[in-house]
Image: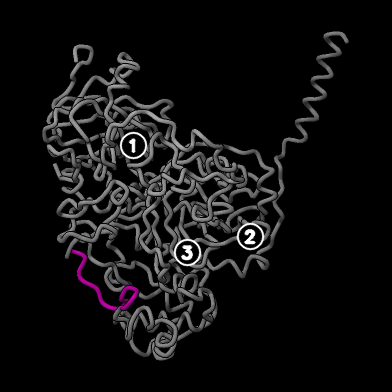
Amino acid sequence: MSTRELTAAVLISAANFGCLAAGPDLGRSIDPAEIAPWDISIQPDGTGLPPGSGTPAQGAPVYAQKCAACHGENGKGALSAAVVGGAALTNGIDTVKTIANFWPYPTTLFDFIRRAMPYQQPKTLTNDEVYALTAYLLALNKLIGENETMNAQTLPKVKMPNRDGFIPRFPDKL
Amino acid sequence: MKNFVVVAGNGLLDRRAFLRGGAALAAAMTGYTLARPAAAAPLADDPWSRAPGTNVPAYGVPSRFEKSVVRTLSNPNGEPRTQHGRTPHHLLQGTSTPNGLHFVISHAGDADIDPEKHRLVIHGLVKRPLLFTLEALARYPMVSRMTFVECGGNSAPLFSSEPIQASVQALHGLASCAEWTGVALSTLLEETGVDPKAKWLVAEGADAPTLSRSVPIAKALDDAMIALYQNGERLMPGNGYPMRLLLPGWEGNMNVKWLRRLKLVEAPAMSYYESRTYAPILPNGKAYQFYFLQEVKSFITHPSPGLMLKAPGFYEISGIAYSGNGRISKVLVSADGGRSWAQAALHEPVLSKAFTRFRIPWNWNGGPAVLQSRAWDEAGNVQPTRAQIIAVRGQAAKVPPVTAFPSQHYNGVTSWAINSGGAVSHVYA
Protein backbone atom coordinates (compact mmCIF):
# COMPACT_ATOMS: atom_id res chain seq x y z
CA MET A 1 0.00 0.00 0.00
CA SER A 2 1.41 3.39 -0.94
CA THR A 3 1.64 6.19 1.56
CA ARG A 4 -1.24 7.92 -0.20
CA GLU A 5 -3.44 4.78 -0.09
CA LEU A 6 -2.53 4.25 3.56
CA THR A 7 -3.42 7.84 4.39
CA ALA A 8 -6.75 7.45 2.60
CA ALA A 9 -7.49 4.23 4.51
CA VAL A 10 -6.71 5.90 7.83
CA LEU A 11 -8.94 8.83 6.93
CA ILE A 12 -11.82 6.52 6.03
CA SER A 13 -11.38 4.64 9.29
CA ALA A 14 -11.28 7.87 11.22
CA ALA A 15 -14.45 9.00 9.49
CA ASN A 16 -16.17 5.75 10.44
CA PHE A 17 -15.03 6.05 14.05
CA GLY A 18 -16.26 9.62 14.03
CA CYS A 19 -19.77 8.40 13.26
CA LEU A 20 -19.69 6.15 16.33
CA ALA A 21 -18.62 8.84 18.77
CA ALA A 22 -22.07 9.63 20.19
CA GLY A 23 -21.35 7.81 23.46
CA PRO A 24 -22.65 4.56 24.90
CA ASP A 25 -26.25 5.82 25.10
CA LEU A 26 -27.37 2.84 27.19
CA GLY A 27 -30.03 4.66 29.17
CA ARG A 28 -33.69 4.03 28.42
CA SER A 29 -35.91 7.03 27.71
CA ILE A 30 -38.51 7.42 30.41
CA ASP A 31 -41.47 9.79 30.45
CA PRO A 32 -42.69 11.86 33.43
CA ALA A 33 -45.76 9.68 33.99
CA GLU A 34 -43.51 6.68 34.56
CA ILE A 35 -41.27 8.65 36.97
CA ALA A 36 -44.19 10.21 38.87
CA PRO A 37 -44.36 7.68 41.75
CA TRP A 38 -40.72 8.43 42.58
CA ASP A 39 -40.87 12.17 41.81
CA ILE A 40 -41.56 13.42 45.33
CA SER A 41 -39.29 16.48 45.14
CA ILE A 42 -40.77 19.66 46.55
CA GLN A 43 -39.37 23.17 46.19
CA PRO A 44 -39.71 25.91 48.83
CA ASP A 45 -42.02 27.81 46.43
CA GLY A 46 -44.44 24.87 46.54
CA THR A 47 -43.51 23.32 43.21
CA GLY A 48 -44.13 19.59 43.48
CA LEU A 49 -46.64 19.73 46.33
CA PRO A 50 -49.37 17.18 45.55
CA PRO A 51 -53.16 17.63 45.66
CA GLY A 52 -54.79 17.09 49.03
CA SER A 53 -55.20 18.99 52.28
CA GLY A 54 -55.33 18.65 56.06
CA THR A 55 -56.02 20.58 59.24
CA PRO A 56 -54.46 20.47 62.73
CA ALA A 57 -57.57 18.71 64.02
CA GLN A 58 -57.24 16.04 61.35
CA GLY A 59 -53.55 15.68 62.12
CA ALA A 60 -53.90 15.15 65.87
CA PRO A 61 -55.22 11.57 65.74
CA VAL A 62 -52.72 10.62 63.01
CA TYR A 63 -49.94 11.99 65.20
CA ALA A 64 -51.21 10.09 68.25
CA GLN A 65 -51.39 6.85 66.30
CA LYS A 66 -48.26 7.02 64.13
CA CYS A 67 -45.82 9.53 65.65
CA ALA A 68 -46.30 9.84 69.41
CA ALA A 69 -44.55 6.56 70.22
CA CYS A 70 -41.22 8.14 69.24
CA HIS A 71 -41.82 11.91 69.35
CA GLY A 72 -43.89 11.88 72.54
CA GLU A 73 -47.36 13.00 73.48
CA ASN A 74 -48.17 16.42 72.02
CA GLY A 75 -44.77 16.53 70.37
CA LYS A 76 -42.83 16.84 73.61
CA GLY A 77 -40.20 14.29 72.60
CA ALA A 78 -39.40 10.76 73.77
CA LEU A 79 -37.04 8.31 72.00
CA SER A 80 -36.83 10.86 69.20
CA ALA A 81 -36.56 14.64 69.23
CA ALA A 82 -39.30 16.96 70.40
CA VAL A 83 -41.25 18.51 67.53
CA VAL A 84 -42.61 21.43 69.54
CA GLY A 85 -40.85 24.40 71.08
CA GLY A 86 -37.19 25.32 70.99
CA ALA A 87 -34.77 27.74 72.65
CA ALA A 88 -33.42 30.93 71.11
CA LEU A 89 -30.51 30.20 68.78
CA THR A 90 -28.40 32.72 70.69
CA ASN A 91 -28.42 30.24 73.61
CA GLY A 92 -25.38 28.55 72.10
CA ILE A 93 -24.03 26.88 68.98
CA ASP A 94 -25.34 23.54 70.29
CA THR A 95 -28.93 24.75 70.72
CA VAL A 96 -31.26 21.96 69.62
CA LYS A 97 -32.61 22.89 66.19
CA THR A 98 -36.38 22.69 65.99
CA ILE A 99 -39.20 23.44 63.58
CA ALA A 100 -39.98 26.62 65.50
CA ASN A 101 -36.48 27.99 66.08
CA PHE A 102 -34.61 26.84 62.98
CA TRP A 103 -36.37 25.32 59.96
CA PRO A 104 -36.46 28.04 57.27
CA TYR A 105 -39.19 26.55 55.04
CA PRO A 106 -42.54 24.89 55.84
CA THR A 107 -42.30 22.76 52.68
CA THR A 108 -39.36 20.87 54.25
CA LEU A 109 -41.71 19.59 56.93
CA PHE A 110 -44.12 18.13 54.39
CA ASP A 111 -41.25 16.75 52.34
CA PHE A 112 -39.45 15.06 55.23
CA ILE A 113 -42.59 13.51 56.73
CA ARG A 114 -43.66 12.17 53.34
CA ARG A 115 -40.29 10.67 52.41
CA ALA A 116 -38.96 9.49 55.77
CA MET A 117 -41.73 9.05 58.34
CA PRO A 118 -42.99 7.10 60.21
CA TYR A 119 -39.52 5.73 60.79
CA GLN A 120 -40.57 2.07 60.59
CA GLN A 121 -43.01 2.52 57.66
CA PRO A 122 -41.84 5.43 55.53
CA LYS A 123 -43.80 6.39 52.41
CA THR A 124 -47.04 4.84 53.73
CA LEU A 125 -48.88 8.03 54.64
CA THR A 126 -51.48 9.46 52.26
CA ASN A 127 -50.92 13.01 51.03
CA ASP A 128 -53.92 14.13 53.12
CA GLU A 129 -52.31 12.59 56.21
CA VAL A 130 -49.02 14.36 55.46
CA TYR A 131 -50.82 17.71 55.04
CA ALA A 132 -52.74 17.07 58.28
CA LEU A 133 -49.58 16.18 60.23
CA THR A 134 -47.82 19.22 58.81
CA ALA A 135 -50.75 21.40 59.87
CA TYR A 136 -50.81 19.77 63.33
CA LEU A 137 -47.09 20.41 63.90
CA LEU A 138 -47.24 23.98 62.59
CA ALA A 139 -50.21 24.71 64.87
CA LEU A 140 -48.55 23.02 67.84
CA ASN A 141 -45.67 25.45 67.31
CA LYS A 142 -48.15 28.36 66.89
CA LEU A 143 -46.94 29.03 63.37
CA ILE A 144 -50.49 28.71 61.97
CA GLY A 145 -53.92 28.97 63.57
CA GLU A 146 -55.85 25.96 64.89
CA ASN A 147 -58.38 26.21 62.06
CA GLU A 148 -56.08 26.74 59.10
CA THR A 149 -56.00 24.20 56.28
CA MET A 150 -52.68 23.22 54.71
CA ASN A 151 -52.57 22.44 51.00
CA ALA A 152 -50.37 23.12 47.99
CA GLN A 153 -51.41 26.79 47.99
CA THR A 154 -51.35 27.64 51.71
CA LEU A 155 -48.35 25.68 52.96
CA PRO A 156 -45.60 27.54 51.04
CA LYS A 157 -47.01 30.85 52.34
CA VAL A 158 -46.42 29.98 56.01
CA LYS A 159 -43.62 32.25 57.23
CA MET A 160 -41.14 30.39 59.38
CA PRO A 161 -39.56 32.47 62.20
CA ASN A 162 -35.96 31.72 61.20
CA ARG A 163 -36.51 32.16 57.45
CA ASP A 164 -33.85 34.89 57.20
CA GLY A 165 -31.40 33.45 59.72
CA PHE A 166 -28.93 31.95 57.25
CA ILE A 167 -25.64 32.94 55.64
CA PRO A 168 -24.31 30.96 52.64
CA ARG A 169 -20.87 29.69 53.68
CA PHE A 170 -19.20 29.66 50.27
CA PRO A 171 -21.39 31.77 47.92
CA ASP A 172 -18.94 31.19 45.05
CA LYS A 173 -19.71 27.46 45.10
CA LEU A 174 -23.43 27.97 44.45
CA MET B 1 22.24 10.81 67.69
CA LYS B 2 24.95 12.52 65.65
CA ASN B 3 23.38 11.48 62.32
CA PHE B 4 20.00 12.99 63.08
CA VAL B 5 19.31 16.67 63.11
CA VAL B 6 16.89 18.00 65.68
CA VAL B 7 14.76 20.52 63.78
CA ALA B 8 12.22 21.64 66.37
CA GLY B 9 11.61 21.63 70.10
CA ASN B 10 11.18 18.54 72.23
CA GLY B 11 13.08 16.22 69.90
CA LEU B 12 11.47 16.51 66.45
CA LEU B 13 13.97 15.25 63.89
CA ASP B 14 14.54 16.15 60.26
CA ARG B 15 11.93 14.38 58.15
CA ARG B 16 14.68 12.96 55.90
CA ALA B 17 16.36 11.19 58.82
CA PHE B 18 14.74 7.88 57.94
CA LEU B 19 16.05 8.03 54.39
CA ARG B 20 19.59 8.59 55.65
CA GLY B 21 19.34 6.34 58.69
CA GLY B 22 17.99 3.39 56.74
CA ALA B 23 17.76 -0.03 58.31
CA ALA B 24 19.77 0.83 61.40
CA LEU B 25 17.29 3.49 62.38
CA ALA B 26 14.31 1.31 61.55
CA ALA B 27 15.71 -1.36 63.85
CA ALA B 28 16.18 1.21 66.59
CA MET B 29 12.56 2.33 66.36
CA THR B 30 10.35 1.71 69.33
CA GLY B 31 6.82 0.86 68.27
CA TYR B 32 3.62 2.13 69.83
CA THR B 33 1.87 -0.58 71.72
CA LEU B 34 -1.48 -1.57 73.11
CA ALA B 35 0.03 -4.51 75.04
CA ARG B 36 2.69 -5.17 77.70
CA PRO B 37 6.26 -6.12 76.78
CA ALA B 38 6.81 -9.90 76.63
CA ALA B 39 9.34 -11.58 78.91
CA ALA B 40 12.56 -12.71 77.26
CA ALA B 41 12.72 -16.43 76.35
CA PRO B 42 14.94 -18.61 74.15
CA LEU B 43 13.77 -18.75 70.51
CA ALA B 44 11.73 -21.85 69.65
CA ASP B 45 9.50 -23.10 66.84
CA ASP B 46 5.91 -22.19 67.55
CA PRO B 47 2.99 -24.48 66.63
CA TRP B 48 2.35 -22.64 63.32
CA SER B 49 5.89 -23.47 62.28
CA ARG B 50 5.39 -27.20 62.91
CA ALA B 51 2.14 -27.96 61.04
CA PRO B 52 0.29 -26.71 57.94
CA GLY B 53 -1.95 -23.74 58.44
CA THR B 54 -5.63 -23.15 57.85
CA ASN B 55 -7.44 -23.45 54.53
CA VAL B 56 -7.39 -20.47 52.22
CA PRO B 57 -10.81 -18.80 52.54
CA ALA B 58 -12.91 -17.75 49.54
CA TYR B 59 -13.07 -14.23 50.89
CA GLY B 60 -10.23 -13.25 53.17
CA VAL B 61 -10.68 -11.63 56.53
CA PRO B 62 -7.97 -10.20 58.81
CA SER B 63 -6.07 -12.40 61.25
CA ARG B 64 -7.96 -13.55 64.33
CA PHE B 65 -5.43 -11.53 66.30
CA GLU B 66 -6.74 -8.31 64.73
CA LYS B 67 -10.23 -8.58 66.17
CA SER B 68 -9.87 -5.26 67.96
CA VAL B 69 -9.38 -3.45 64.65
CA VAL B 70 -13.02 -2.62 64.12
CA ARG B 71 -15.36 0.30 63.76
CA THR B 72 -17.02 1.63 66.91
CA LEU B 73 -20.81 1.63 66.67
CA SER B 74 -23.07 4.34 68.07
CA ASN B 75 -26.23 2.25 67.88
CA PRO B 76 -25.27 -1.45 67.73
CA ASN B 77 -28.78 -2.75 68.50
CA GLY B 78 -30.41 -0.82 65.70
CA GLU B 79 -32.70 1.37 67.75
CA PRO B 80 -34.88 3.55 65.49
CA ARG B 81 -32.33 6.30 64.97
CA THR B 82 -29.12 6.97 63.06
CA GLN B 83 -26.24 4.47 63.21
CA HIS B 84 -22.59 5.56 63.03
CA GLY B 85 -19.58 3.29 62.48
CA ARG B 86 -16.27 5.09 63.01
CA THR B 87 -12.90 4.32 61.38
CA PRO B 88 -10.08 3.21 63.78
CA HIS B 89 -7.40 5.57 62.42
CA HIS B 90 -5.02 4.72 65.29
CA LEU B 91 -4.92 1.07 64.20
CA LEU B 92 -4.43 1.72 60.47
CA GLN B 93 -1.60 3.04 58.34
CA GLY B 94 -1.15 4.44 54.84
CA THR B 95 -3.98 6.32 53.15
CA SER B 96 -6.51 3.74 51.96
CA THR B 97 -9.27 2.73 54.37
CA PRO B 98 -10.16 -0.99 54.16
CA ASN B 99 -13.75 -1.35 52.96
CA GLY B 100 -14.95 -3.06 56.12
CA LEU B 101 -13.56 -0.20 58.21
CA HIS B 102 -14.77 2.71 56.05
CA PHE B 103 -16.93 4.94 58.18
CA VAL B 104 -20.67 4.57 57.74
CA ILE B 105 -23.57 6.74 58.80
CA SER B 106 -26.97 5.27 58.01
CA HIS B 107 -30.06 7.14 59.10
CA ALA B 108 -32.30 4.06 58.96
CA GLY B 109 -30.02 1.06 58.56
CA ASP B 110 -28.11 -0.10 55.49
CA ALA B 111 -30.46 -0.66 52.56
CA ASP B 112 -30.34 -4.25 51.28
CA ILE B 113 -30.65 -3.63 47.55
CA ASP B 114 -31.01 -6.24 44.81
CA PRO B 115 -28.73 -4.84 42.09
CA GLU B 116 -30.85 -6.43 39.36
CA LYS B 117 -33.82 -4.35 40.44
CA HIS B 118 -32.04 -1.09 41.21
CA ARG B 119 -32.63 1.83 38.83
CA LEU B 120 -31.11 5.29 38.45
CA VAL B 121 -33.34 7.95 36.91
CA ILE B 122 -32.05 11.33 35.69
CA HIS B 123 -34.85 13.78 34.92
CA GLY B 124 -36.17 17.28 35.49
CA LEU B 125 -34.54 20.08 33.48
CA VAL B 126 -32.96 17.75 30.93
CA LYS B 127 -33.61 17.34 27.22
CA ARG B 128 -34.19 13.59 27.55
CA PRO B 129 -34.99 11.85 30.87
CA LEU B 130 -33.14 8.54 31.11
CA LEU B 131 -33.26 5.42 33.25
CA PHE B 132 -30.09 3.41 33.84
CA THR B 133 -29.73 -0.11 35.13
CA LEU B 134 -26.55 -1.17 36.92
CA GLU B 135 -25.81 -3.44 33.96
CA ALA B 136 -26.01 -0.46 31.61
CA LEU B 137 -23.83 1.78 33.79
CA ALA B 138 -21.21 -0.96 34.07
CA ARG B 139 -20.68 -0.68 30.29
CA TYR B 140 -19.80 3.02 30.39
CA PRO B 141 -16.24 4.33 30.37
CA MET B 142 -15.07 4.26 33.98
CA VAL B 143 -13.01 6.69 35.97
CA SER B 144 -11.10 5.91 39.18
CA ARG B 145 -9.86 8.26 41.84
CA MET B 146 -8.67 8.12 45.42
CA THR B 147 -10.78 10.45 47.46
CA PHE B 148 -11.79 10.92 51.05
CA VAL B 149 -15.35 11.08 52.25
CA GLU B 150 -15.91 12.95 55.50
CA CYS B 151 -19.09 13.56 57.46
CA GLY B 152 -19.80 17.27 57.95
CA GLY B 153 -20.05 16.44 61.66
CA ASN B 154 -16.68 14.71 61.92
CA SER B 155 -14.49 16.05 64.75
CA ALA B 156 -17.53 17.74 66.35
CA PRO B 157 -16.38 16.73 69.88
CA LEU B 158 -13.68 19.40 69.52
CA PHE B 159 -16.42 22.03 69.83
CA SER B 160 -16.69 20.92 73.48
CA SER B 161 -15.54 23.58 75.94
CA GLU B 162 -13.29 20.96 77.62
CA PRO B 163 -11.20 18.39 75.75
CA ILE B 164 -13.11 15.09 75.68
CA GLN B 165 -10.91 12.11 76.55
CA ALA B 166 -11.46 9.76 73.64
CA SER B 167 -9.56 8.03 70.86
CA VAL B 168 -8.82 9.53 67.46
CA GLN B 169 -11.45 7.05 66.25
CA ALA B 170 -14.12 8.64 68.45
CA LEU B 171 -13.01 12.19 67.65
CA HIS B 172 -12.16 11.96 63.93
CA GLY B 173 -13.49 8.55 62.83
CA LEU B 174 -16.17 9.88 60.47
CA ALA B 175 -13.68 10.32 57.64
CA SER B 176 -12.21 7.61 55.41
CA CYS B 177 -10.46 7.35 52.05
CA ALA B 178 -10.87 4.85 49.23
CA GLU B 179 -10.27 4.39 45.54
CA TRP B 180 -13.69 4.86 43.95
CA THR B 181 -14.48 3.70 40.43
CA GLY B 182 -17.56 4.52 38.44
CA VAL B 183 -19.05 6.66 35.70
CA ALA B 184 -18.40 10.40 35.55
CA LEU B 185 -21.76 12.09 36.12
CA SER B 186 -20.90 14.53 33.33
CA THR B 187 -20.88 11.57 30.89
CA LEU B 188 -24.50 10.74 31.78
CA LEU B 189 -25.58 14.39 31.77
CA GLU B 190 -24.16 14.71 28.25
CA GLU B 191 -26.61 12.02 27.21
CA THR B 192 -29.63 13.48 29.00
CA GLY B 193 -28.70 17.00 27.95
CA VAL B 194 -28.89 19.81 30.49
CA ASP B 195 -31.43 22.62 30.19
CA PRO B 196 -29.56 25.92 30.74
CA LYS B 197 -32.10 26.77 33.45
CA ALA B 198 -30.84 23.88 35.59
CA LYS B 199 -28.68 25.28 38.40
CA TRP B 200 -28.97 22.43 40.93
CA LEU B 201 -29.71 18.77 41.04
CA VAL B 202 -31.54 16.95 43.79
CA ALA B 203 -29.98 13.57 44.58
CA GLU B 204 -32.07 10.94 46.28
CA GLY B 205 -31.42 7.50 47.73
CA ALA B 206 -33.48 4.31 47.60
CA ASP B 207 -33.10 3.82 51.36
CA ALA B 208 -36.03 3.96 53.82
CA PRO B 209 -35.73 7.71 54.56
CA THR B 210 -35.28 8.44 50.83
CA LEU B 211 -32.38 10.68 51.81
CA SER B 212 -32.17 13.73 49.61
CA ARG B 213 -29.65 16.54 49.06
CA SER B 214 -29.36 19.44 46.62
CA VAL B 215 -26.08 19.81 44.72
CA PRO B 216 -25.01 22.79 42.56
CA ILE B 217 -24.89 21.76 38.90
CA ALA B 218 -21.32 23.10 38.60
CA LYS B 219 -20.10 20.42 41.03
CA ALA B 220 -22.09 17.75 39.19
CA LEU B 221 -20.36 18.70 35.92
CA ASP B 222 -16.94 19.08 37.53
CA ASP B 223 -15.76 15.91 39.29
CA ALA B 224 -18.93 14.11 40.44
CA MET B 225 -19.08 10.36 39.89
CA ILE B 226 -21.68 7.62 40.06
CA ALA B 227 -19.47 5.29 42.08
CA LEU B 228 -19.91 1.53 41.62
CA TYR B 229 -16.65 0.21 43.08
CA GLN B 230 -14.77 0.88 46.31
CA ASN B 231 -11.12 -0.18 46.51
CA GLY B 232 -11.69 -2.46 43.53
CA GLU B 233 -14.79 -4.31 44.71
CA ARG B 234 -18.44 -3.33 44.54
CA LEU B 235 -19.50 -0.76 47.10
CA MET B 236 -20.12 -1.99 50.63
CA PRO B 237 -23.83 -1.95 51.55
CA GLY B 238 -23.13 0.71 54.18
CA ASN B 239 -21.40 2.85 51.58
CA GLY B 240 -24.29 2.79 49.12
CA TYR B 241 -24.37 -0.53 47.24
CA PRO B 242 -24.92 -0.76 44.36
CA MET B 243 -24.26 2.92 43.53
CA ARG B 244 -23.70 6.23 45.23
CA LEU B 245 -23.10 9.82 44.28
CA LEU B 246 -19.47 10.76 44.90
CA LEU B 247 -18.69 14.46 45.27
CA PRO B 248 -14.93 14.59 45.99
CA GLY B 249 -14.11 16.91 48.89
CA TRP B 250 -17.71 17.72 49.78
CA GLU B 251 -19.75 16.97 52.88
CA GLY B 252 -20.30 13.22 53.28
CA ASN B 253 -24.08 13.46 53.55
CA MET B 254 -24.23 14.94 50.02
CA ASN B 255 -22.53 11.82 48.60
CA VAL B 256 -25.97 10.21 48.49
CA LYS B 257 -25.83 6.44 48.97
CA TRP B 258 -28.12 3.90 47.28
CA LEU B 259 -28.65 6.59 44.63
CA ARG B 260 -31.84 6.14 42.61
CA ARG B 261 -32.79 9.57 41.32
CA LEU B 262 -31.21 12.82 40.12
CA LYS B 263 -33.58 15.65 39.32
CA LEU B 264 -32.22 18.78 37.68
CA VAL B 265 -33.92 21.88 39.06
CA GLU B 266 -33.60 25.67 39.15
CA ALA B 267 -33.23 26.08 42.93
CA PRO B 268 -32.26 23.95 45.94
CA ALA B 269 -35.02 21.83 47.49
CA MET B 270 -34.05 22.90 51.03
CA SER B 271 -34.19 19.31 52.18
CA TYR B 272 -34.08 18.38 55.88
CA TYR B 273 -30.35 17.73 55.85
CA GLU B 274 -29.32 20.89 54.00
CA SER B 275 -31.75 23.32 55.64
CA ARG B 276 -31.49 21.90 59.17
CA THR B 277 -28.79 19.37 60.01
CA TYR B 278 -25.70 20.62 58.20
CA ALA B 279 -26.35 24.31 58.86
CA PRO B 280 -24.12 25.11 61.87
CA ILE B 281 -25.34 27.73 64.34
CA LEU B 282 -22.99 30.69 64.87
CA PRO B 283 -22.49 32.50 68.20
CA ASN B 284 -24.72 35.40 67.08
CA GLY B 285 -27.65 33.04 66.44
CA LYS B 286 -27.36 33.09 62.65
CA ALA B 287 -26.41 29.85 60.88
CA TYR B 288 -24.17 28.94 57.97
CA GLN B 289 -26.01 27.36 55.05
CA PHE B 290 -24.63 25.34 52.13
CA TYR B 291 -21.28 24.71 53.82
CA PHE B 292 -20.56 21.84 51.39
CA LEU B 293 -16.75 21.98 51.43
CA GLN B 294 -14.64 19.84 53.76
CA GLU B 295 -11.83 22.25 54.50
CA VAL B 296 -8.12 21.56 54.99
CA LYS B 297 -7.47 19.43 58.06
CA SER B 298 -4.99 17.09 59.70
CA PHE B 299 -4.63 15.04 62.85
CA ILE B 300 -1.96 12.78 64.31
CA THR B 301 -2.91 9.10 64.44
CA HIS B 302 0.38 7.74 65.83
CA PRO B 303 0.68 8.31 68.70
CA SER B 304 -2.83 9.09 69.84
CA PRO B 305 -4.95 8.30 72.90
CA GLY B 306 -4.92 4.56 73.65
CA LEU B 307 -1.49 4.00 72.10
CA MET B 308 1.27 3.87 74.73
CA LEU B 309 4.87 4.97 74.35
CA LYS B 310 6.71 2.16 76.11
CA ALA B 311 10.01 3.90 76.69
CA PRO B 312 11.94 7.00 75.67
CA GLY B 313 13.62 6.85 72.28
CA PHE B 314 12.76 6.93 68.61
CA TYR B 315 9.17 7.05 67.37
CA GLU B 316 7.59 8.04 64.12
CA ILE B 317 4.84 10.60 64.47
CA SER B 318 2.37 10.13 61.64
CA GLY B 319 -1.10 11.19 60.71
CA ILE B 320 -3.54 12.10 58.00
CA ALA B 321 -4.04 15.38 56.16
CA TYR B 322 -6.62 16.21 53.49
CA SER B 323 -8.48 19.08 51.88
CA GLY B 324 -11.62 19.39 49.81
CA ASN B 325 -9.81 22.18 47.97
CA GLY B 326 -7.15 19.98 46.37
CA ARG B 327 -3.74 18.62 47.28
CA ILE B 328 -2.01 18.98 50.61
CA SER B 329 1.03 21.18 50.09
CA LYS B 330 2.62 21.09 53.54
CA VAL B 331 2.16 19.65 57.02
CA LEU B 332 3.97 21.05 60.04
CA VAL B 333 4.29 19.12 63.29
CA SER B 334 5.02 20.44 66.77
CA ALA B 335 6.09 18.46 69.84
CA ASP B 336 6.01 21.44 72.20
CA GLY B 337 2.41 22.58 71.93
CA GLY B 338 2.94 24.87 68.96
CA ARG B 339 5.99 26.82 70.14
CA SER B 340 8.19 25.37 67.39
CA TRP B 341 7.33 23.47 64.23
CA ALA B 342 9.05 21.14 61.77
CA GLN B 343 7.96 20.09 58.30
CA ALA B 344 6.72 16.49 57.98
CA ALA B 345 7.43 14.21 55.01
CA LEU B 346 4.38 13.59 52.78
CA HIS B 347 3.82 10.08 51.49
CA GLU B 348 3.76 10.10 47.70
CA PRO B 349 1.75 10.41 45.60
CA VAL B 350 -0.02 13.38 47.11
CA LEU B 351 -3.46 13.28 45.51
CA SER B 352 -6.14 15.94 45.28
CA LYS B 353 -8.98 15.58 47.80
CA ALA B 354 -7.45 12.38 49.18
CA PHE B 355 -5.87 11.33 52.47
CA THR B 356 -2.19 12.24 52.57
CA ARG B 357 -0.06 10.42 55.13
CA PHE B 358 2.52 12.62 56.84
CA ARG B 359 5.43 11.32 58.88
CA ILE B 360 8.22 12.78 60.98
CA PRO B 361 10.76 11.05 63.21
CA TRP B 362 10.85 11.98 66.86
CA ASN B 363 13.21 11.32 69.71
CA TRP B 364 11.06 11.29 72.82
CA ASN B 365 13.14 12.22 75.84
CA GLY B 366 10.60 10.69 78.21
CA GLY B 367 9.28 14.04 79.41
CA PRO B 368 5.92 15.72 78.87
CA ALA B 369 5.20 16.74 75.28
CA VAL B 370 2.25 18.14 73.33
CA LEU B 371 1.96 16.95 69.73
CA GLN B 372 0.12 18.91 67.06
CA SER B 373 -0.13 18.89 63.27
CA ARG B 374 -1.17 21.68 60.95
CA ALA B 375 -1.84 21.36 57.21
CA TRP B 376 -1.78 23.64 54.19
CA ASP B 377 -3.43 22.95 50.82
CA GLU B 378 -2.41 23.92 47.30
CA ALA B 379 -5.14 26.56 47.18
CA GLY B 380 -3.30 28.37 49.97
CA ASN B 381 -5.71 27.49 52.78
CA VAL B 382 -4.23 26.79 56.19
CA GLN B 383 -5.77 24.64 58.88
CA PRO B 384 -6.85 26.95 61.72
CA THR B 385 -5.71 26.50 65.28
CA ARG B 386 -8.50 25.49 67.65
CA ALA B 387 -8.46 29.02 69.14
CA GLN B 388 -8.93 30.51 65.66
CA ILE B 389 -11.89 28.32 64.70
CA ILE B 390 -13.58 28.72 68.09
CA ALA B 391 -13.21 32.51 67.87
CA VAL B 392 -15.44 32.45 64.78
CA ARG B 393 -17.62 29.42 65.38
CA GLY B 394 -17.99 29.38 69.18
CA GLN B 395 -17.99 26.32 71.39
CA ALA B 396 -20.54 24.31 73.32
CA ALA B 397 -21.27 25.74 76.77
CA LYS B 398 -21.31 22.29 78.38
CA VAL B 399 -19.27 19.18 77.67
CA PRO B 400 -21.42 17.09 75.31
CA PRO B 401 -21.32 13.28 75.03
CA VAL B 402 -18.52 12.19 72.71
CA THR B 403 -21.07 10.87 70.19
CA ALA B 404 -22.99 14.17 70.09
CA PHE B 405 -22.71 16.82 67.38
CA PRO B 406 -22.60 20.21 69.13
CA SER B 407 -21.83 21.76 65.71
CA GLN B 408 -20.40 20.73 62.33
CA HIS B 409 -17.34 21.38 60.18
CA TYR B 410 -14.52 21.49 62.73
CA ASN B 411 -11.19 21.52 60.91
CA GLY B 412 -8.98 23.02 63.60
CA VAL B 413 -5.82 21.61 65.13
CA THR B 414 -5.94 18.59 67.47
CA SER B 415 -3.46 18.36 70.38
CA TRP B 416 -2.22 15.19 72.10
CA ALA B 417 -0.34 15.41 75.39
CA ILE B 418 2.22 12.76 76.29
CA ASN B 419 2.93 12.33 79.98
CA SER B 420 6.13 10.98 81.47
CA GLY B 421 4.55 7.52 81.65
CA GLY B 422 4.03 7.49 77.87
CA ALA B 423 0.24 7.79 78.01
CA VAL B 424 -1.47 10.01 75.44
CA SER B 425 -4.40 12.29 76.24
CA HIS B 426 -6.47 14.89 74.42
CA VAL B 427 -5.76 18.48 75.40
CA TYR B 428 -6.45 21.97 74.13
CA ALA B 429 -3.15 23.77 73.60
Residue at the extreme right of the image, as rendered: A1
Q: Are marks 1 and 2 in contact (CB under 8 Å)?
A: no
Q: Is residue B186 among the parts visible in the rendering?
A: no
Residue at the extreme top of the image, as rendered: A2
Examine the image and state in which quarter residue A133 appears: bottom left
Examine the image and state in which quarter residue B16 appears: top left
**Residue B91 placement, left or right of B134:** left
Q: Is residue A50 among the parts visible in the rendering?
A: yes
Residue beneath the point at 67% across and 42% down: B140
The mark that comes first in sequence, 1 or 3, is 3
Task: Measuring from the top left, give residue B30's x and y in whole percent.
Answer: 26, 29
| Count of picture labels | 3
Callout 3: residue from which chain? Answer: B
SS at circle 1: strand
Residue tagged by mark 3?
B109
Residue tagged by mark 1?
B320
Callout 2: residue from which chain? Answer: B
Q: Which residues are magenta?
A: A78-90
SS at circle 2: loop
- Depicted B152 relative to depicted A82: above or below: above
**Residue A156 placement, left or right of B362:** right
Residue beneath the point at 11% across and 35% down: B368
Task: Measuring from the top left, give residue B299's x and y in whole percent.
Answer: 28, 39
Residue A84 lies within the magenta run: yes
Task: Measuring from the top left, give residue B14's x and y in whole percent.
Answer: 24, 19
The mark that comes first in sequence, 1 or 2, is 2
**Mark 1 → mark 3, Cα distance in angstroms:** 29 Å
Residue tagged by mark 2?
B114
**Residue A70 placement, left or right of B309:** right
